[in-house]
Image: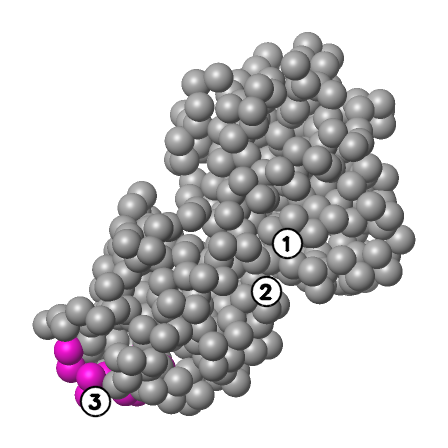
Amino acid sequence: MKKIMLIDEYKIVNYAGGIEKVLCNFANEFVKRGYDISLVCLDTEKGMPLYDLNDKVEFINLAFTGKRYASLKYFLKKAEKEVLRIFGGSRMKFGSFNIVDPKLKYFHEQFISRLKRIISQIRPDVIICATSDSTYFAQTACSYQIPTITMCHTDVRRMVNGALGYQKKAWLNAKAVQVLMPSYVDILKHTGANNVVCIPNVVEEIQSNDIADLKKNKDTYTVITVGRVEKSVKRTHLLVEAFAKISNKFPNWELIVLGELDKGGYKRYIDSVIKKSNINRQVHFGGVVHNVLERLRYSDIFVLPSESEGFGLALTEAMSVGLPVVGYKNCSAVNELIVNGKNGFLCEDGIDDLAEKLSVLMQNKNLRVEFGVNSHEMMKEYAPKKIWDKWENLINTI
């Protein structure tokens, strides 16, 4: 039985992240295929991943193996970081000198030392890493003796442009790097990476009789988005502002926003837009939900206002249930998944064009139905068996 270790250095306990969902689905599928699977993280919160995990998957939280991770030393490093931020700003920079983040350094040291013990106990045949950081941890912990595969779940351009030396070294030394879109392959190869393989995310197959019924007459129709409520990348405010601009013309339409809420200043800004536009009864924030597909199935239009995406898992889920979709033409992945005028619309950046394209769809049921049928058909390319077979082939050729 081949042993596969999955590593995610980010938060995974009770966290509704895209990477975390992919890893849990991966673990569950390969247990079914007869592999021995361990899923490793370092999370200061006790518990299990938010997404269902097969009982046969060994879930290991390094924070609770051996000595306590969140010890006095951890809190001292955390306090040291805050002091440095007071004097050096959020980037902890003093003049031309960048100060090493003491909390991050402690995290790296602890992750590697704890991972080294776990690897020696489990002796995996291959280690699949959620990021270039976790690839670096794995390679260091096993002294490059076990083959690693780096997953790239972000826009490759962002990863390459923002990469630190150790991160680039990690993916260059990986046996393979998996990317999510065909256009990402050449970008990564130009950095010197050798075995770059495009394997998209799995999109759940929805039967035709279970997709959204867009022909149905309703008292209230729904525009929906799914994703973290966040300003710089997810840009929820653009959708709220676009909806506000046309809401008077469509009093029987609502906007539903699902995803983790930022309860700080950004959410307060969005609330002020809603209040000023008098659309309190039309805009609803649902937070994190477990029945996303069900909520999508009862919606009419899906919008993803992101600036960039690695794949756009929520977008593909909306397409799988047969929704017309709208996004920005300069958004990576989205501009490959949405074919303008076939399954939805690609907009110019900003509010005006988004509002215009939404208006076109909101007043044309036949167009929504046509785009929705095309969306559903296009997602057959991402059927689970096709994608998992590609992964299994990659694993067995390393």
Which span is picked out in magenta? 242-252
Picture quadrant of residue 325: bottom left
Identify the image quadrant of residue 344.
Answer: bottom left
Instruction: Where is residue 50? Give x, y as percent.
Output: 39, 35
**The residue under label 3 is which amino acid type?**
Lys
Q: Residues within 10 Å of mark 3 (few under 14, many from 20)?
A: few
Disc 1 versus disc 3: distance between alpha carbons?
39 Å
Where the C terminus falls, by quadrant? top right
One can see residue 326 in this view = no
Pointers 1 and 2 in contact (C-beta within 8 Å): yes
Q: Does residue 264 lie above or below 348 as drawn?
A: above
Amino acid carrying label 1: it is Leu
Along the viewing direction, whichever of 89 and 351 lies nearer the viewer: 351
Mark 1 and mark 2 lie on one chain; the one further toward the N terminus is 1
- What x and y, as percent, mark residue 165? 83, 49
Q: Distance between the residues labelled 1 and 2?
A: 8 Å
* Residue under numbered circle 3: 249
Question: Residue at horizontal 69%, vertical 60%?
Answer: 182
Residue type, numbered disc 2: Ala
Secondary structure beneath label 2: loop
The disc at residue 333 is: 2
Please give the residue where the numbered disc 1 appears in the rendered image: 180
Within 10 Å of disc 1 (Cα), the crowding (few <14, some 14-19, many 20+) is: many
Q: Nearer the viewer, mark 1 or mark 3?
A: 1
Residue 386 - label: none
The secondary structure making up most of the magenta span is helix
Which residue appears at 59% of the width and 44% of the height?
A: 387
Q: In this view, does 37 lie to the left or right of 55?
A: right
